[in-house]
Image (tube, coloured by chain):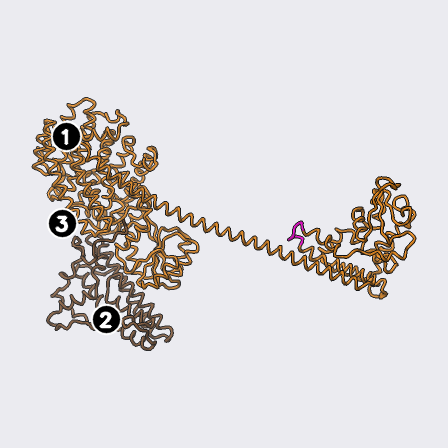
Amino acid sequence: MDERYRGQQPLLPLLSIAASRAQYAPTPAWPPSTSQLPSLGVKREGASPEHMADRKEGHEDSMSSTSDFVKKLYKMLEDQSFQNVVSWGPQGDCFVVKDMNEFTKSILPRMFKHSNFASFVRQLNKYDFHKVKNTDDNQFGEQSWTFRHPDFHADRRDSLENIKRKVPAQRKSTAGGTPLPITPSSSYAPAAAYPQSATSSSYSANFAVGSESSKIDTMQAQIATLQAQLSSLGAAHEEVLSHVRNLERSYQDVLVEMVGFQRGMAQQDGLMQNLIQYFLRENNGNGAGKVKQLPSNGGMDGGGNPFLFMQQQETQQLLDKSFAEQDVARATLVQMSEISRRAEAVGMSFGGQASGSSSGAGSSSASNVRLGASVGTSGIGAAMGRMDMLARIEELQAQRDRSRLNTPLFNSSNNAGASGSGANGMSTNPEEDQRRQQQQMGAQHRTESPESDDYEDEMVVPTVTNPPSLDVALGASPETWSMAGGDAHAGLEVYTIGHLMPRGSAAFPDAQGNWSFDSDAFASGMVGKQEASYASTSSGSGSGGGGGSPPTKQTLRVRRSTFVPGWAVPPRVLLVDDDAVSRKLSSKFLQVFGCTIDVAVDGVGAVNKMNLEKYDLVLMDIVMPKLDGVSATSMIRKFDPQTPIISMTSNSRPNEIMTYYSSGMNDILPKPFTKEGLLDMLEKHLTHLTVIKEKMSTSMRIPRQPSGIPPLNDAGFESALQAGAASSSGASSSPGSTLMEYGLGSPDAGDGRINVLAGMGLSDEQYNIMLAGIVAGDGFNFGEKRTRDSMDEGDHPDGRDGKRSRFEVVE
Amino acid sequence: MADDPPPRTRTSPPPADPAPKPPASKDPNPETPRSPPPPADSESVPDPPAKSEARHRLIWHRQAIDMDIFSQILELDEDGTYDFSKEMVVAYFSQATTTFSDMDKAIARRADEKLPELSALGHFLKGSSAALGISKVQATCEKMQHYGALRDEAADKDLKADEALSKISALLVEVKAEYADAERWLKKWYEDKNESFEGVKP
């Protein structure tokens, strides 16, 4: 048979053309059909040997209507050489595979071209052969298999053609069904390819057999099954797709939720910051209250309290609400006169007290009364400071290291002397009074050697320095200013500036309250350091103070500066406007408000910039060439849902406003806007940046002037701000004297300071590191600023003079 | 707290600031032999010009310049200088000149293009004028913006194209005159401060 088959191969082409006899018709049809099959189909045939065999049968036997398989089976049983392995049963109505192993090894490959006994059995089953159970008559042993078919008899050859394959549907479901369950998607292609081969093979078989109608039925049944399979596959595919879609949807949901979460977090953040701010305020209030509650309110109270009071009740209010300069100026005037009034009163009373407590105080009180609040307050402060300060120190710094406090007596007295002279310079005391007072104080310090007295002395120092600040504030009295000694009042002047600083004033109460501790700690530092700081102070004020009281200042003015919120970090604002004039104006405003500005001239530029950089706020014009503000906003919103975008527009009809909001804008700033309007906007949308700043500067007691006050048009300001970054930005533009003094003072004072941030979870170490960072930042900024100033070709050769003078009080 | 309405009204000029001269007191400079600005608008003052030139100027200027806004810009100047405001003004001058020439060009364009173009230009100049407080120019430009969009806001009705065009043509003359007045006024203002525009870059 093998030979025959092989011999046939070369003939096939010929046969395919020539053979028209029914018998061989299928033979030529088969190979071409196979060759035309897609590779998958071919592979598949190799995988299921029984089909190969099945098909070969078709052209291997000459019996016309009998199935190939049956014919082969019959032939095999006729072959005597196989007798010992497979043979007819004793009655000839069945056949017996006596040795399955031998059968599988030798006969199956020869007869059926495979060596799979199970396949053979399956094939038999398909032709409705049934295995006969080995029962009593098991003469061929345990390994034997007996198969029977009613029409399969050794002596009834003609009935063989009654043996047919069972309905193909069954076969199909097994053949096509097997791959299906495994991996539907992967089996899809093979399954689709399979029917072709199956169809072709059965087709050829049909041809050969000639029982066409039944075969067509089976084919149709097959097709139906295939179609069913196809549709089921399609359904499965759909199912998978929908599952994927579901997944995608839930993924999107998750994304949306995450964005929502982020928003929530941001809101929470805002709330926290508000709370912090609130508590900070509360704190400040408490600080003031504490001072008040102290039984013996010394100079500190007399000086600081009115200030606090004024600040919180009026100044801060005024400032927070973005009052105009002139209002602030007026308020400041009122405030000053009030302060001077109070200080005077305090000076008097303290004078009395002081004289009671110390011999020297009498004269000082006299001078106080005569000279007005300034020196009086300081002298009294010095006297009174003891009780007051001691009490406060004990209360607030119980844990403080004593040795630190008990610095050399000389040191503190020295300091006191210095500050005393400073006060003198400020207040324009007659020299004699001054000297006398100083001597008295010095004597006081020297005579009182015990520990506790040292303590007091140290306390005195701050108190002495403290009033001068008031003096300056009070300095409204013009003559003080002009007569003020250059280097002594320098350091004091700094404080003054701090006080007058309107925004800074918000933070001031705290600074004021804690001030004594600063200077106290400062005083306890090394003498050398003190001197250094003083030197720097004086040098800083030499230029600042000297130029600070130019004759041009005829009125008390607090200029534009005032409204600047203290930013933790200069907010980065993207300004989008096509109108150069408006752009210039807005930029200037933003600059004054301490923002870092980037500019885009149309919507396209805005979208590009938003893509590249992160901004804290966007100010967006609406009508622009190329891409209008609304479209630009909706584009930006696709990748940046967060950054506040504020439309600047002169078209603000309700329907237009709706359009703006629906495009994703957060707010509307009608054009032409005012400074106040813009500032309100900034504060509203950048609260998170202001609060931190307030907190920081409050805690650091850095005069607020810096960031707030607008040295602002010099080029150095912006860069200084940037360089100063978050924490140091506050101090960046403040006069060098302030920087130096605070800078040097603070690290020394490290453990002496109260960690104001403790309540916010900052450890003392962190706090000190922060302070140190500020010092470093300040130094840098200071230097940079100076160079910038000198490079500035502006009208002021010394830019600082001009800036400073804004806050000086001249009549 | 930022939401609190500022209790201050913007109408009070900052008295503490000497730089911006209070318009009422400073402006009528009788010794300046300047011709009264041509009353381009309908509500021009009927005073005999010879008699009260200064007063006329004052009135004109009250209508034409929003001193609140202008002084806001002046506040941005450094003490004793006018550098920034001068820059602003010069930038405005150049922008206005450019815009007027654009308007002239736009008028000459095809009918279906010119109106939107004129509307956009009107809007543009309206913005810059508003930024400086040049109210009259601002108002006229706004009209032009609306006419260009075939809309008469004052009469609250829609316009036909040719109607709008003729209105705009009239407006263009008007706005140029108004601008000329404003420019003259601004230049005079700086002259009085001994400030020149020499070398100021917009």
Rounded to the nearest angstrom, the CA distance separating label 1 from label 2 is 73 Å
Tell me which chain the residue with mark 2 is part of: B
**Residue A15: percent from left, percent from top:** 84, 63
Report the residue at 87% width, 48% height from top: A95
Which portion, as a residue range, is magenta? A181-187
Residue underneath mark 1:
A383
Rounded to the nearest angstrom, the CA distance separating label 3 from label 1 is 36 Å
Q: Which mark is residue A554?
A: 3
Tell me which chain the residue with mark 1 is part of: A
Kindly indicate whether the residue at mark 3 contacts the one at mark 2 (C-beta within 8 angstroms). no
For the residue marked with disc 3, what is the amino acid?
A: Gln
Instruction: Please identify the dominant SS of the magenta region.
Output: helix
In the displayed structure image, the side of residue A539 where residue A598 appears, left or right: right
Q: Which residue appears farthest toward the bottom when viewing the image?
A: B162
Residue A415 seen in render: no
**Residue A467: percent from left, percent from top:** 16, 36
User: What is chain A's hue in the picture?
Assistant: orange
